[in-house]
Amino acid sequence: MEITGRLPRASQLRGWIGAAWTAVICWLRRDTLPLLFFGSIALLAMSPVLASPRTHILGLPGDNLQYAYITGWVAQALRMGMSPLVDPRLNYPDDLLLTGTDAPFLSVILAAPATWALGPVFGYNLIICASHILTGYFTYLWLLALTGSRAGAIIAGLLFMLAPYRTIRSYGQLNLISTQAIPLFFWALHHALAQPQRGELRLWLVGGATLLVGLLSQYYLIICLTTGMAYALLLSWRQPLSLLVPGWRIAFSVGIGALLSALPYLASFSTYAAYGVARTRLWSADPLNFLLPPTTHPLWGQLVATVRSEAYIGEKTLYVGLVALVLAGLGYWHAPVQLRQHRSVWLGTALVGFVFALGTDLWLHNAPLSRDAPFWLPAYYLAQLPLLGSMRVWARFGIITIFFIALLAGLGATWLIARQPSRMRQLAVLGLLVGLISLDLLPANLGTTALGPRAIDTWLAAQPDDFAVAFLPPENDLVNYRAMFGSLYHGKHLPAFMHSRHMPSSYRRYMHATRDFPSAAALHELQTLHIRYIILDTQAYTGWRGPTWAALAEQIEQEPRLRFVTERDGYVVLEFAE
């Protein structure tokens, strides 16, 4: 009886495996070419580091060092069976909560096997490359499901994937390059709203998509929740009462997904500091940011800079694309009858994203239209809500405008290509559009940074025992991020922070006490913390917010409590004299 009872279950299991394998084969047959296309474009965007993906990262040193550290620590923690969200070696004498900054923890966890095998720099680069591919591919899938046009779907995916907003962030902001969940969120939301009678699956899907957004970026979670409400209202504006029954169920599902994704960050709640309007006004987008090519464009960026320079290219690069705007206009006016509702909702949501991206008040040419008596925009009032005051850059809402313009452009490309009388003409038009878009949105090449263990990290790794060190100066982000990354190789304890605005209290005490090193108060703090080695980054002492290295070296020579230990490539190591 037991044997015969097991046979159906084993047979059923084989059936499931067979069905899953068949589904994978069908998927690969259908989407291998689009995946190869998006993969090749992603590799072109990553071309500056392709020759050395294990030792170089895109861009000048900055936030990219921090995210490379996060990639390395999460992989190490998983291998050691520790929490990937807490580093007990950093923020000495306490622990460092990695949720002190926004990070794509899901991607970092999924990349851990590659990080184990090839190192944290490779894992970091892999996450960026995968984000490029998946952003294009998921956008492609939604438009393909709506139109059945592979050509139009490829154009939409390419536009969103190559948006300068995204590619400029591959040079430092791993959370903001992780846009792949945005298409899934709005896709799931639309289906849950448009066909609520289809059962619980759609609720699970929209909740899961919300969770995915939050696990990749809390910034995008807030942006998607805000613009998602606008999407729902626009979709139901003819019959607003139709939202009453399914609306609360969808809102509950979205809320659960949002809450689950935010849970890790609640542990860092006490460290988050709200920004005042004086700080957030600066990051209001100019309408021209959406229309003018970025000054980093390899071909005509310098020409654009002579017409209108942009001091904050890292945050205010929002160029939608000339080709995208033309195609979006065609898509809006020539959308199929069955997609007329989609086009209006997409355009409306794009405008909502645009308004929020304008920030607290209207700015033109990087100056407020009215400095002393501004007319406050919706972002100003949204910032008054709990937790949202910790958002600094409202221009990031522009990703929603860019996304929906890309979808409308996909509709335009679908119409334009379908008008061609032959297959060859259709392929020629598709190739022309791909070429024009690639030229229009050609990614910048801002150089690379070599990243690996420094000479000082190798020296620390060779020192026996478990002890604490302190890297100075304490207020310098680069000194902190380089020290964090170096800890992956030597494993010593050291004071550190994740975000200069959201510092833990223990680091603030340390910073305030040691900023005027080698004062008596600074030496007392370091001795109280039982710091064995004091490591000074000589290149960071430039006279800005502190002394020059020459002046500091003179003070150190006159301090009998300090003793020189060694020097490694510009890092001077001191210890307390016996």
Image (spheres, rainbow, N blue to C red):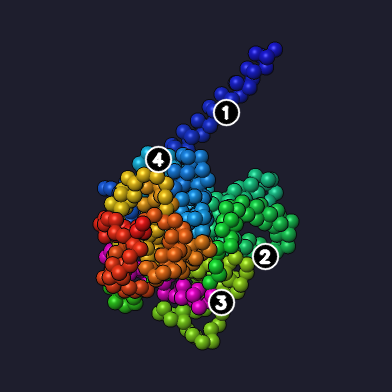
| Other-residue count near label 4 (Cα within 10 Å), few / some / many at <14 / 14–19 / ≥20 | some
Residue 97 drawn at (x, y percent)? 52, 54
Q: Amino acid at mark 4?
A: Trp
Residue type at tag 1: Trp
Please state the horizontal and vertical placement of residue 42, each as a whole percent of the image. 36, 50
Q: Residue at x 47, y 44 (%)?
A: 77
In magenta segment, residue 283: yes
Residue type indicated by callout 2: Arg
The quadrant the C terminus occupies is bottom left
Q: Secondary structure at mark 1?
A: helix
Query: To which residue does mark 4 refer?
Result: 116
Q: Is 433 rendered above or below residue 476?
A: above
Query: Label 1, on which residue?
Result: 16
Give the mark nearest the N terminus, 2 or 1.
1
Look at the numbered disc 2 and give the secondary structure of its residue.
Answer: loop
Q: Residue furthest bottom?
A: 372
Q: Is residue 348 magenta?
A: no
Real-space Cα separation, disc 2 to disc 3, in angstroms: 26 Å
Q: In the rendered structure, which disc, 2 or 3, sits on the residue that comes first in sequence? A: 2
Q: Can you say which quadrant of the picture contains the N terminus?
A: top right
Select label 3 or label 1 by which is in front. 3
Q: Name the residue carrying label 3.
A: 377
Q: Secondary structure at mark 4?
A: helix
Badge number at residue 540: none
| Disc ID at residue 238 | 2
The residues tagged by marks 1 and 4 sit, at their Cα atoms, a distance apart of 32 Å
**CB atoms of marks 2 and 4 within 8 Å:** no
Q: Is residue 69 above or below residue 349?
A: above
- Magenta stretch, residue numbers: 276-301
- Looking at the rendered image, the disc whose residue lies closer to the viewer, 1 or 4, is 4
